[in-house]
Image (spheres, helix red, strand yellow):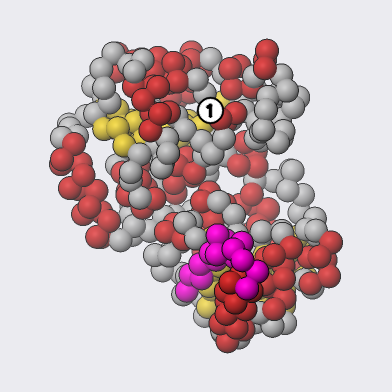
Amino acid sequence: MDLNGKRILIVKLRYIGDTLSIVPVVENLKRIASESRVDVLVNRGTEPVVIHHPSIERTWVYDYDLSKRSSWRSMRYQAGLVRRLRGARYDVVIDFTHGDRAALICRLTGAPVRVTHSHAGTLSRWLMNRFAESDPASNHIVHHQLASLEVLGLDGFEPTLSLHVPHSVQRAVDRRVARAGLPGGRPWAAVHPGSRGELRRWRSGRFAELIERLRAAGPVAILLLGGPGEEAVLEAVQSRMERPAELCSCDLSLLELGELLRRCALFVGNDSAPGHLAAAVGCPTVSLFGPTFPHMWRPLAPKGEVLFKDPPCCGCRQEACIRPEAWCMDLIGVEEVWEAVQRVLEPEPASAGRAEAK
Protein backbone atom coordinates (compact mmCIF):
# COMPACT_ATOMS: atom_id res chain seq x y z
CA MET A 1 0.00 0.00 0.00
CA ASP A 2 1.49 3.33 -1.04
CA LEU A 3 0.93 5.63 1.92
CA ASN A 4 2.32 8.75 0.30
CA GLY A 5 -0.43 11.33 0.17
CA LYS A 6 -2.57 9.32 2.62
CA ARG A 7 -4.03 10.69 5.86
CA ILE A 8 -3.23 8.41 8.80
CA LEU A 9 -4.57 8.52 12.36
CA ILE A 10 -2.87 6.64 15.21
CA VAL A 11 -5.01 6.05 18.31
CA LYS A 12 -3.51 5.32 21.74
CA LEU A 13 -5.79 6.11 24.69
CA ARG A 14 -3.50 5.05 27.52
CA TYR A 15 -0.86 6.51 29.86
CA ILE A 16 2.15 8.78 29.31
CA GLY A 17 4.70 6.08 28.56
CA ASP A 18 2.22 4.38 26.23
CA THR A 19 1.72 7.61 24.32
CA LEU A 20 5.46 8.10 23.95
CA SER A 21 5.70 4.55 22.56
CA ILE A 22 3.83 5.56 19.38
CA VAL A 23 6.59 7.98 18.39
CA PRO A 24 8.67 5.23 16.69
CA VAL A 25 5.61 4.31 14.60
CA VAL A 26 5.19 7.92 13.53
CA GLU A 27 8.89 8.32 12.73
CA ASN A 28 9.01 5.12 10.68
CA LEU A 29 5.86 6.04 8.76
CA LYS A 30 7.32 9.41 7.82
CA ARG A 31 10.71 7.92 6.96
CA ILE A 32 9.18 5.33 4.63
CA ALA A 33 6.26 7.42 3.30
CA SER A 34 7.47 10.99 3.64
CA GLU A 35 4.44 12.44 1.85
CA SER A 36 1.92 10.88 4.23
CA ARG A 37 0.12 12.94 6.88
CA VAL A 38 0.18 11.45 10.37
CA ASP A 39 -2.13 12.58 13.19
CA VAL A 40 -2.57 11.05 16.65
CA LEU A 41 -5.44 10.73 19.13
CA VAL A 42 -4.28 10.43 22.76
CA ASN A 43 -5.64 10.89 26.26
CA ARG A 44 -5.69 14.34 27.81
CA GLY A 45 -2.63 14.80 30.01
CA THR A 46 -0.38 12.69 27.77
CA GLU A 47 -0.35 14.98 24.72
CA PRO A 48 2.73 17.07 25.69
CA VAL A 49 5.07 14.20 24.78
CA VAL A 50 3.87 14.18 21.15
CA ILE A 51 2.35 17.57 20.39
CA HIS A 52 5.63 19.22 19.34
CA HIS A 53 6.87 16.33 17.21
CA PRO A 54 7.55 17.71 13.70
CA SER A 55 6.27 14.51 12.03
CA ILE A 56 2.84 14.79 13.68
CA GLU A 57 0.52 17.15 11.85
CA ARG A 58 -2.24 17.24 14.46
CA THR A 59 -2.66 15.94 17.98
CA TRP A 60 -6.26 15.16 18.90
CA VAL A 61 -6.90 15.04 22.65
CA TYR A 62 -9.47 12.65 24.10
CA ASP A 63 -11.02 13.92 27.34
CA TYR A 64 -11.70 10.72 29.26
CA ASP A 65 -13.18 12.53 32.26
CA LEU A 66 -15.65 14.39 30.08
CA SER A 67 -16.59 11.19 28.27
CA LYS A 68 -17.53 9.59 31.61
CA ARG A 69 -19.86 12.35 32.83
CA SER A 70 -23.65 12.37 32.48
CA SER A 71 -25.01 10.41 29.54
CA TRP A 72 -26.10 13.52 27.67
CA ARG A 73 -22.81 15.42 28.07
CA SER A 74 -20.80 12.33 27.22
CA MET A 75 -22.84 11.61 24.10
CA ARG A 76 -22.61 15.22 22.96
CA TYR A 77 -18.85 15.33 23.50
CA GLN A 78 -18.16 12.05 21.74
CA ALA A 79 -20.53 12.83 18.86
CA GLY A 80 -18.71 16.12 18.31
CA LEU A 81 -15.32 14.40 18.37
CA VAL A 82 -16.43 11.77 15.87
CA ARG A 83 -17.88 14.46 13.60
CA ARG A 84 -14.56 16.30 13.56
CA LEU A 85 -12.59 13.09 13.00
CA ARG A 86 -14.84 12.16 10.08
CA GLY A 87 -14.27 15.61 8.66
CA ALA A 88 -10.53 14.90 8.56
CA ARG A 89 -11.22 12.13 5.99
CA TYR A 90 -8.62 9.62 7.14
CA ASP A 91 -7.51 6.89 4.77
CA VAL A 92 -5.98 4.72 7.50
CA VAL A 93 -6.53 4.46 11.25
CA ILE A 94 -4.26 2.39 13.48
CA ASP A 95 -5.47 1.50 16.98
CA PHE A 96 -2.96 0.59 19.69
CA THR A 97 -5.42 0.97 22.58
CA HIS A 98 -7.08 -2.43 22.05
CA GLY A 99 -10.25 -1.36 23.83
CA ASP A 100 -13.87 -1.22 22.73
CA ARG A 101 -14.15 2.58 23.00
CA ALA A 102 -11.12 3.19 20.77
CA ALA A 103 -12.25 0.54 18.26
CA LEU A 104 -15.65 2.20 17.95
CA ILE A 105 -14.07 5.61 17.43
CA CYS A 106 -11.83 4.12 14.72
CA ARG A 107 -14.81 2.62 12.93
CA LEU A 108 -16.80 5.85 13.11
CA THR A 109 -13.99 7.87 11.51
CA GLY A 110 -15.07 6.31 8.23
CA ALA A 111 -11.49 5.35 7.31
CA PRO A 112 -11.53 2.48 4.79
CA VAL A 113 -8.41 0.85 6.28
CA ARG A 114 -8.56 0.15 10.01
CA VAL A 115 -5.57 -1.61 11.59
CA THR A 116 -5.15 -3.24 14.99
CA HIS A 117 -3.57 -6.38 16.45
CA SER A 118 -5.13 -9.82 16.18
CA HIS A 119 -5.22 -10.17 19.98
CA ALA A 120 -7.59 -7.20 20.34
CA GLY A 121 -11.04 -7.82 21.80
CA THR A 122 -14.11 -9.23 20.10
CA LEU A 123 -15.56 -5.82 19.24
CA SER A 124 -12.28 -4.83 17.60
CA ARG A 125 -12.47 -7.96 15.45
CA TRP A 126 -15.85 -6.75 14.17
CA LEU A 127 -14.98 -3.09 13.71
CA MET A 128 -11.43 -3.23 12.33
CA ASN A 129 -10.38 -4.89 9.05
CA ARG A 130 -6.59 -5.35 9.08
CA PHE A 131 -4.92 -7.38 11.84
CA ALA A 132 -1.24 -7.57 12.75
CA GLU A 133 0.06 -10.92 13.99
CA SER A 134 2.41 -10.06 16.83
CA ASP A 135 2.57 -11.56 20.31
CA PRO A 136 2.53 -8.75 22.92
CA ALA A 137 4.00 -11.07 25.54
CA SER A 138 7.08 -11.79 23.43
CA ASN A 139 7.95 -8.34 22.11
CA HIS A 140 8.77 -4.92 23.42
CA ILE A 141 5.78 -2.61 23.01
CA VAL A 142 7.63 -0.54 20.40
CA HIS A 143 8.47 -3.57 18.23
CA HIS A 144 4.96 -4.91 18.77
CA GLN A 145 3.43 -1.69 17.47
CA LEU A 146 5.86 -1.40 14.56
CA ALA A 147 4.74 -4.88 13.47
CA SER A 148 1.31 -3.41 12.73
CA LEU A 149 2.84 -1.55 9.79
CA GLU A 150 3.66 -4.87 8.13
CA VAL A 151 -0.01 -5.35 7.22
CA LEU A 152 0.33 -2.15 5.18
CA GLY A 153 3.24 -3.67 3.28
CA LEU A 154 5.99 -1.79 5.12
CA ASP A 155 9.23 -3.18 6.56
CA GLY A 156 12.76 -2.15 7.53
CA PHE A 157 11.75 -0.50 10.78
CA GLU A 158 14.08 1.38 13.11
CA PRO A 159 13.10 1.63 16.82
CA THR A 160 13.84 5.35 17.04
CA LEU A 161 12.52 7.42 19.94
CA SER A 162 12.63 11.15 20.57
CA LEU A 163 11.09 13.89 22.68
CA HIS A 164 10.83 17.35 21.15
CA VAL A 165 11.07 20.21 23.61
CA PRO A 166 10.30 23.76 22.41
CA HIS A 167 12.73 26.58 23.15
CA SER A 168 10.26 28.22 25.52
CA VAL A 169 10.37 25.16 27.77
CA GLN A 170 14.15 24.99 27.54
CA ARG A 171 14.36 28.58 28.73
CA ALA A 172 11.95 27.84 31.59
CA VAL A 173 14.21 25.00 32.68
CA ASP A 174 17.22 27.33 32.44
CA ARG A 175 15.49 29.64 34.91
CA ARG A 176 14.55 26.74 37.18
CA VAL A 177 18.15 25.50 37.20
CA ALA A 178 19.43 29.00 38.01
CA ARG A 179 16.98 29.44 40.91
CA ALA A 180 17.96 26.05 42.34
CA GLY A 181 21.64 26.89 42.01
CA LEU A 182 22.39 23.59 40.32
CA PRO A 183 26.16 23.34 39.77
CA GLY A 184 27.46 23.29 36.24
CA GLY A 185 30.82 21.74 37.03
CA ARG A 186 29.63 18.30 38.13
CA PRO A 187 27.27 15.67 36.73
CA TRP A 188 23.59 15.54 37.66
CA ALA A 189 21.90 12.30 38.67
CA ALA A 190 18.10 12.13 38.53
CA VAL A 191 16.31 9.79 40.93
CA HIS A 192 12.61 9.06 40.57
CA PRO A 193 11.31 6.90 43.47
CA GLY A 194 7.64 7.12 42.46
CA SER A 195 5.46 5.10 40.11
CA ARG A 196 1.83 4.71 39.08
CA GLY A 197 1.30 1.99 41.73
CA GLU A 198 2.90 1.30 45.11
CA LEU A 199 3.83 -2.27 44.20
CA ARG A 200 6.20 -0.92 41.52
CA ARG A 201 8.21 1.13 44.03
CA TRP A 202 11.60 0.24 45.46
CA ARG A 203 11.88 1.11 49.15
CA SER A 204 12.70 4.73 50.01
CA GLY A 205 15.55 3.71 52.32
CA ARG A 206 17.26 1.88 49.48
CA PHE A 207 16.98 4.87 47.18
CA ALA A 208 18.54 6.99 49.94
CA GLU A 209 21.40 4.50 50.38
CA LEU A 210 22.04 4.49 46.64
CA ILE A 211 22.14 8.29 46.61
CA GLU A 212 24.73 8.33 49.37
CA ARG A 213 26.86 5.88 47.37
CA LEU A 214 26.67 8.22 44.38
CA ARG A 215 27.78 11.12 46.53
CA ALA A 216 30.62 9.14 48.08
CA ALA A 217 31.91 8.14 44.64
CA GLY A 218 32.51 11.73 43.52
CA PRO A 219 31.00 15.17 43.03
CA VAL A 220 27.41 14.84 41.85
CA ALA A 221 24.20 16.88 42.06
CA ILE A 222 21.16 14.86 43.08
CA LEU A 223 17.83 15.69 41.45
CA LEU A 224 15.02 14.01 43.38
CA LEU A 225 12.04 14.11 41.05
CA GLY A 226 8.40 13.12 41.23
CA GLY A 227 5.04 13.71 39.64
CA PRO A 228 1.89 15.35 41.02
CA GLY A 229 0.90 13.80 44.35
CA GLU A 230 4.29 12.17 44.97
CA GLU A 231 5.50 14.70 47.54
CA ALA A 232 5.32 12.15 50.37
CA VAL A 233 7.28 9.64 48.30
CA LEU A 234 10.11 12.14 47.78
CA GLU A 235 10.05 13.21 51.42
CA ALA A 236 10.37 9.58 52.53
CA VAL A 237 13.61 9.34 50.55
CA GLN A 238 14.99 12.74 51.47
CA SER A 239 14.37 12.20 55.19
CA ARG A 240 16.76 9.24 55.02
CA MET A 241 19.50 11.15 53.18
CA GLU A 242 22.44 12.75 54.95
CA ARG A 243 21.66 16.09 53.32
CA PRO A 244 18.90 17.33 50.99
CA ALA A 245 18.94 16.86 47.25
CA GLU A 246 20.22 19.77 45.18
CA LEU A 247 16.78 19.84 43.57
CA CYS A 248 13.60 18.22 44.89
CA SER A 249 10.49 18.77 42.82
CA CYS A 250 7.06 17.33 42.02
CA ASP A 251 5.80 20.29 39.98
CA LEU A 252 7.68 20.02 36.70
CA SER A 253 5.63 19.68 33.54
CA LEU A 254 6.28 16.63 31.37
CA LEU A 255 8.36 18.65 28.93
CA GLU A 256 10.27 20.41 31.69
CA LEU A 257 11.03 17.02 33.20
CA GLY A 258 12.21 15.73 29.84
CA GLU A 259 14.44 18.74 29.27
CA LEU A 260 15.94 18.43 32.75
CA LEU A 261 16.63 14.74 32.17
CA ARG A 262 18.36 15.59 28.90
CA ARG A 263 20.94 17.46 30.97
CA CYS A 264 21.50 14.58 33.40
CA ALA A 265 24.27 11.99 33.29
CA LEU A 266 22.08 9.33 34.93
CA PHE A 267 18.48 8.40 35.63
CA VAL A 268 17.53 5.83 38.28
CA GLY A 269 13.90 4.95 38.86
CA ASN A 270 11.10 2.44 38.96
CA ASP A 271 9.06 1.31 35.96
CA SER A 272 7.31 4.61 35.19
CA ALA A 273 6.90 7.36 32.59
CA PRO A 274 10.01 9.39 33.62
CA GLY A 275 12.19 6.43 32.65
CA HIS A 276 10.77 6.56 29.12
CA LEU A 277 11.24 10.33 29.01
CA ALA A 278 14.88 9.85 30.02
CA ALA A 279 15.35 7.27 27.27
CA ALA A 280 13.76 9.57 24.69
CA VAL A 281 16.26 12.35 25.42
CA GLY A 282 19.29 10.05 25.52
CA CYS A 283 19.91 9.97 29.27
CA PRO A 284 21.47 6.68 30.52
CA THR A 285 18.92 4.79 32.61
CA VAL A 286 18.87 2.25 35.41
CA SER A 287 15.32 0.92 35.72
CA LEU A 288 13.88 -1.25 38.49
CA PHE A 289 11.15 -3.68 37.49
CA GLY A 290 9.01 -5.91 39.72
CA PRO A 291 5.41 -6.76 38.76
CA THR A 292 5.82 -5.86 35.07
CA PHE A 293 7.97 -7.47 32.37
CA PRO A 294 10.97 -5.39 31.21
CA HIS A 295 11.23 -7.18 27.86
CA MET A 296 7.89 -5.53 27.08
CA TRP A 297 8.23 -2.18 28.84
CA ARG A 298 11.87 -1.29 29.50
CA PRO A 299 12.98 2.23 28.47
CA LEU A 300 14.68 2.14 25.07
CA ALA A 301 17.63 4.22 26.22
CA PRO A 302 20.82 4.32 24.12
CA LYS A 303 22.57 3.09 27.26
CA GLY A 304 20.52 1.43 29.97
CA GLU A 305 20.36 -1.30 32.57
CA VAL A 306 17.37 -3.14 34.04
CA LEU A 307 17.10 -4.87 37.42
CA PHE A 308 14.43 -7.57 37.44
CA LYS A 309 14.02 -10.79 39.45
CA ASP A 310 11.37 -12.46 37.25
CA PRO A 311 9.04 -13.54 40.09
CA PRO A 312 6.54 -16.29 39.27
CA CYS A 313 3.67 -13.88 39.92
CA CYS A 314 4.95 -11.21 37.51
CA GLY A 315 2.09 -9.74 35.53
CA CYS A 316 -0.18 -9.56 38.58
CA ARG A 317 -2.99 -7.00 38.82
CA GLN A 318 -0.83 -4.88 41.19
CA GLU A 319 -3.69 -4.43 43.65
CA ALA A 320 -2.16 -6.34 46.57
CA CYS A 321 1.00 -8.43 46.76
CA ILE A 322 0.21 -12.15 46.88
CA ARG A 323 3.78 -12.95 48.02
CA PRO A 324 4.54 -10.28 50.66
CA GLU A 325 7.29 -12.43 52.15
CA ALA A 326 9.09 -12.24 48.78
CA TRP A 327 7.86 -8.96 47.33
CA CYS A 328 9.43 -8.59 43.90
CA MET A 329 10.84 -5.08 44.46
CA ASP A 330 12.40 -6.15 47.77
CA LEU A 331 14.39 -8.81 45.92
CA ILE A 332 16.42 -6.06 44.25
CA GLY A 333 19.39 -5.15 46.43
CA VAL A 334 21.27 -1.86 46.68
CA GLU A 335 24.58 -3.46 45.73
CA GLU A 336 23.34 -4.76 42.38
CA VAL A 337 21.70 -1.43 41.54
CA TRP A 338 24.96 0.31 42.37
CA GLU A 339 26.84 -2.06 40.05
CA ALA A 340 24.35 -1.27 37.27
CA VAL A 341 24.87 2.46 37.87
CA GLN A 342 28.62 2.02 37.52
CA ARG A 343 28.17 0.17 34.23
CA VAL A 344 26.02 2.87 32.62
CA LEU A 345 28.39 5.58 33.85
CA GLU A 346 31.40 3.99 32.15
CA PRO A 347 32.73 6.39 29.50
CA GLU A 348 31.37 5.81 26.00
CA PRO A 349 33.57 5.70 22.90
CA ALA A 350 34.52 9.14 21.65
CA SER A 351 32.27 8.72 18.59
CA ALA A 352 29.13 8.22 20.66
CA GLY A 353 26.88 11.25 20.93
CA ARG A 354 24.05 12.39 23.14
CA ALA A 355 20.53 13.16 21.99
CA GLU A 356 19.66 16.82 21.71
CA ALA A 357 16.36 18.59 22.23
CA LYS A 358 14.61 19.66 19.04
Res 156 visible: no
Image quarter of residue 104? bottom right
Q: Percent position (x, y) of residue 142? A: 61, 52
Image quarter of residue 53? bottom left
Q: Nearer the viewer, residue 35 or 203?
A: 203
Tell me the magenta residue range: 58-72
Residue 109 forms part of the magenta stretch: no
Residue 63 forms part of the magenta stretch: yes
Q: Give me the residue at 67% from left, 17% from top.
A: 324
The quadrant of the picture occupied by the N terminus is bottom right
Residue that mark 1 sits on: 201
Secondary structure beneath dot 1 equals loop
189 relative position to 115: left or right: left
34 relative position to 358: left or right: right
Q: Is residue 158 above or below residue 343?
A: below
Q: Percent position (x, y) of residue 348? A: 38, 34
158 relative position to 250: left or right: right
Q: Percent position (x, y) of residue 22? A: 56, 58
At label 1, the amino acid type is: Arg
Q: Is residue 155 above or below residue 181?
A: below
